[in-house]
């Protein structure tokens, strides 16, 4: 039976890929985005289809909340994929109050405007585990969040609050997917996401700036792999009303090593020497960095239903894809105006 599918954050890196992988001619798609970090170019192909409708709006904002609520109520979706969120270190550090309140308010707006039997998929984040040194991190690992007065934690606090609101709501079927570092060619280097930022610096012949001492370990996944795992999980026998980690337990690397790799791969591609690496220790001292030494997912729970979760594109190829995209296109920046 044809479904009405609501995707919030549909012009984002992950939302646009989700739309691509879910798209069928039979279903109709309602895309919500405020284009704060999203880009219309990612969904232009879809906006030409009759069964796709863009609903530009700011979820969880102070202004116009009544009309947002009305519009959401009129959408009457059969399933909700809620991805819209303020993303990127720059956003988080510069507008911490909005980062907390908008995530909470957006969740409340959505829940109060849809029927209780509509399945609700929410993309949360590995940031909610905070500074817990356990490795790998399983879904029941406790959150070790830092002080709420440190803006750095506003993103995790907003996500945790939204998770709690969803889990304690009357929604009959929900899934909370905690995504780990996800990247892809069109990820915006200006929002602070690490791989595109490093690639941009190296392509511009500028030093790569590493926050802190660079010994923090992260794992990276390619956006189409992450979305494929998400979709497989949603359509599997995995019990709803549960939390699942989604990401890669391969591609583990220190941020210093990552910077060196990016410098090398860019130099191989465009010629010349590797750009130098600079360490920004003020960033570390000023508390802007969360000082999370390692963040890697325990995928046992998800793997029961998605056997190949974590087994995605190799880090070398991910970096190659980002370099190629940034060499071919004008970089997409958050300040770019979309008509
Ligand atoms: N990329 C990652 O590494 C990662 C990791 C963990 C979790 N996530 C989560 O996945 C989701 C998608 O992230 P992404 O990487 O695609 O980021 P993104 O910035 O590319 O996408 C977010 C989208 O939401 C839109 N948006 C933001 N606030 C909005 C609001 N108030 N109202 C309407 N639209 C709004 C943005 O314009 C953008 O299109 C987010 O919920 C994010 O927290 C991402």
Image (tube, rainbow, N blue to C red):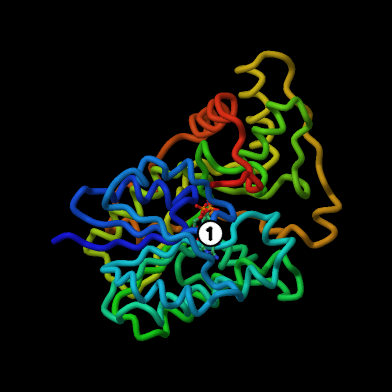
The answer to whether 122 appears left or right of 150 in the picture is left
Q: Residue at x 30, y 81 (%)?
A: 116
Would you say residue 163 is visible in this rendering?
no
Q: Position of residue 86 (x, y in %)?
A: 59, 61
Quarter placement of the N terminus = bottom left
Q: Position of residue 198 (x, y in %)?
A: 67, 36
Q: Front-most of 186 and 46?
A: 46
Q: Front-most of 200 and 12?
A: 12
Corner quadrant of residue 81: bottom left
Q: Position of residue 10 (x, y in %)?
A: 43, 54
Q: Residue at x 47, y 51 (%)?
A: 11
Would you say residue 230 is visible in this rendering?
yes
- Label 1 element class: loop
- Residue 116 against residue 189 in the figure, above or below: below
Q: Callout 1: few (<14), some (14-19), or many (20+) C-alpha neighbours within 10 Å?
A: some
Label 1 C-beta lies within 8 Å of the nearest ligand 1 atom: yes
Given the current orientation, which residue lies at the most extreme top position?
A: 271
- Residue 253 against residue 139 in the figure, above or below: above
Q: Front-most of 180 and 75?
A: 75
Q: Residue at x 42, y 56 (%)?
A: 246
Report the residue marked by disc 1.
34
Given the current orientation, which residue lies at the most extreme left position?
A: 1
- Residue 49 against residue 240 in the figure, above or below: above
- Residue 243 against residue 316 in the figure, above or below: below
The answer to whether 258 appears left or right of 11 in the picture is right
Q: Position of residue 186 (x, y in %)?
A: 52, 39
Q: Residue at x 61, y 24 (%)?
A: 265
> What number of labels is visible?
1
The answer to whether 326 appears left or right of 48 in the picture is right
């Amino acid at each position: 039976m044809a479904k009405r599918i609501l995707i919030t954050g549909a012009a984002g890196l992950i939302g646009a890929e989700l739309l691509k992988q879910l798209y069928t001619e039979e279903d109709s798609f309602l895309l919500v985005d405020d284009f704060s970090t999203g880009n219309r170019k990612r969904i232009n192909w879809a906006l030409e289809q009759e069964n796709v409708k863009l609903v530009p709006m700011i979820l969880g904002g102070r202004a116009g909340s009544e009309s947002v609520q009305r519009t959401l109520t009129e959408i009457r979706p059969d399933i909700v994929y809620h991805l819209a969120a303020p993303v990127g270190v720059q956003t988080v550090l510069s507008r911490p109050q909005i980062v907390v309140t908008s995530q909470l308010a957006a969740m409340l707006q959505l829940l109060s405007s849809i029927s209780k039997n509509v399945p609700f998929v929410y993309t949360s984040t590995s940031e909610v585990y905070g500074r817990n040194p356990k490795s790998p991190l399983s879904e029941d690992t406790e959150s070790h969040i830092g002080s709420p007065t440190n803006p750095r934690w506003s993103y995790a606090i907003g996500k945790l609050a939204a998770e709690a609101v969803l889990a304690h709501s009357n929604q009959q079927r929900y899934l909370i997917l905690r995504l780990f570092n996800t990247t892809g060619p069109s990820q915006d280097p200006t929002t602070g996401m690490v791989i595109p930022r490093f690639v941009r610096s190296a392509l511009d012949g500028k030093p790569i700036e590493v926050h802190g001492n660079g010994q923090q370990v992260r794992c990276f996944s390619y956006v189409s792999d992450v979305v494929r795992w998400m979709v497989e999980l949603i359509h599997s026998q995995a019990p709803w009303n549960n939390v699942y980690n989604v990401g890669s337990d391969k591609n583990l690397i220190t941020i210093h090593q990552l910077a060196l790799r990016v410098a090398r791969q860019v130099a191989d591609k465009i010629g010349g020497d590797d750009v130098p690496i600079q360490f920004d220790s003020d960033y570390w001292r000023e508390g802007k960095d969360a000082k999370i030494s390692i963040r890697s997912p325990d995928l046992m729970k998800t793997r029961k239903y998605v056997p190949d979760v974590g087994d995605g594109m190799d880090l070398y190829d991910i970096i190659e894809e980002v370099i190629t995209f940034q060499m071919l296109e004008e970089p997409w920046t958050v300040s770019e105006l979309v008509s």
